[in-house]
Image (cartoon, rainbow, N blue to C red):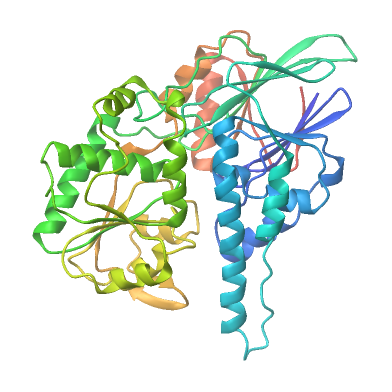
Amino acid sequence: MKLTSYGAALEVTGSQHLIEANGKKILLDCGLFQGRRKDAFEKSRDFKYDPTAIDAMILSHAHIDHSGNIPHLVKEGFQGVIYCTKATKDLCDVMLMDSAHIQEADAEYFARKLRDTALQPIEPLYTQEDAEYALKFFKTIPLGKRFKLYDGIYLTFVEAGHVLGSAMVVLDIKDKEDGKEKRLIFTGDMGRCKMPIINDPYQIEEADYILTESTYGNRTHAPIEEGIPELARIINRTVRRGGKIIIPSFAFERTQELIYGIHLLIDRKEIPTNLPIFIDSPLATNITGIFQEHLELYDKEIRDYFNLDHNPFKPKQLKHVDSVEESKKLNYFIGPCIIISASGMCEAGRIRHHLKNNIEDPKNTIVVVGYMAQHTLGRKLVDGVPMVKIFDQMYKVNSEVVVVESFSAHADMNDLDEYISNIKGLKKVMLVHGEPDQSEPMAERLKTKLGVETEIMEPEKTVEL
């Protein structure tokens, strides 16, 4: 059995890992790279393997850095089956179409901007038509069901606790050459216990190998319980100075968690109960609807909230902004409000317009509630740079920038260590989906504490298992 990482190795985005076993090639995830626009486009465009040679693909969850390159994979000749959970398929139905729409819109925008220059216009990796076609290749499998992929290769999905529909991948493989049975776990993105909305990660008890994320392999998160009170303090001080609260947020999961948290604060009268809340992301609107179709994945707390005739995703002050015209009107909104808009790393979408229009006003607050990859606009804000480029113009960062880490849906170093230490029989741990300053200390820690062989996966390096 062989494993090669073609994405999310020594970096956080673009998850793509190839398993070769019993004459089959199985791709784990096929995500888009996120970062500098030109670099991300080139990395996502150029597959380092032959898509036509892939027999099957297994998708851990619907986040675009794990799923977003699937239409391109199909466009380049992949003809196998894409396995995932039902919720992940439902989410990909809207997220991949949205990704295609953004690419087409960006291409059109840059074509207009470059019309009178010698620069070459950009082309989308795929179109909405490509995305719609790729969705025909999906097949859903319930959590906990052992499914036969091929002779001697079985797939089981278990709860990853990261986002709605997220799953850890368990592959049980009986090697045709030596007859030995081996179990490989791919965590995808692993979540945290006690997060709102979805269930906690399922503890797998035995495995030979684990391919795990290391996004926060050397950092701890603030306790989850601190997130909502901190949000209240930020909102109240911004309202007192008459400013707007601008929150770049992933349309998927983080936006729903924020709405739920803000709803709780309104119910408790801990923030102004008449404060307007705008969700300026049609994708977030569609995803919130999908959340309400999958109550079976919720934890007890939020199911009880529904039973009290509360819809946690519909506070009465909330308005979903659908059209571009409505979004532009928010530029002229007078008085305090909350604007939650995509994309989460501030590299595309409507959030860039809201930042452009609000970042130089010291009354406003930009609230960062998610991971920001290197070289993104979001990372620059987190790093405290005094000026940022938005739409090829420089803007002073006069607004308050606050990072709230307790909302992170990724396991931190303590979560990862505990989870891995509870797996019996581990022969090897392989780290992906982490920058070196996180994965390297984690590798040393696991070697020292657990005495288990640990390797940081490198791009295109094949590991024999």
Give how far across and how far down residue 31 sits, in percent: 63, 46
Q: Is residue 272 left or right of residue 140?
A: left
Residue at position x 53%, y 43% in the image: 435
Q: Is residue 160 left or right of residue 390?
A: right
Give how far across and how far down residue 443 sits, in percent: 55, 28
Q: Quadrant of residue 114?
A: bottom right
**Residue 453, above or below 344:** above
Q: Nearer the viewer, residue 133 or 5?
A: 133
Q: Is residue 121 left or right of residue 236?
A: right
Q: Nearer the viewer, residue 439 or 351?
A: 351
**Residue 307, above or below 236:** above
Give how far across and how far down residue 247 sits, in percent: 32, 54
Q: Quadrant of the N terminus?
A: top right
Give how far across and how far down residue 260 sits, in percent: 29, 38
Q: Residue furthest front?
A: 309
Q: Quadrant of residue 327?
A: bottom left
**Residue 367, above or below 63:** below
Q: Quadrant of residue 365?
A: bottom left
Residue at position x 16%, y 42% in the image: 266
Residue at position x 56%, y 76% in the image: 109
Residue at position x 59%, y 45% in the image: 93
Q: Is residue 291 visible?
A: yes
Q: Is residue 250 visible?
A: no
Count of all numbered marks drawn on residues in the image:
0
Q: Nearer the viewer, residue 75 or 450?
A: 75
Q: Quadrant of the C terminus?
A: top right
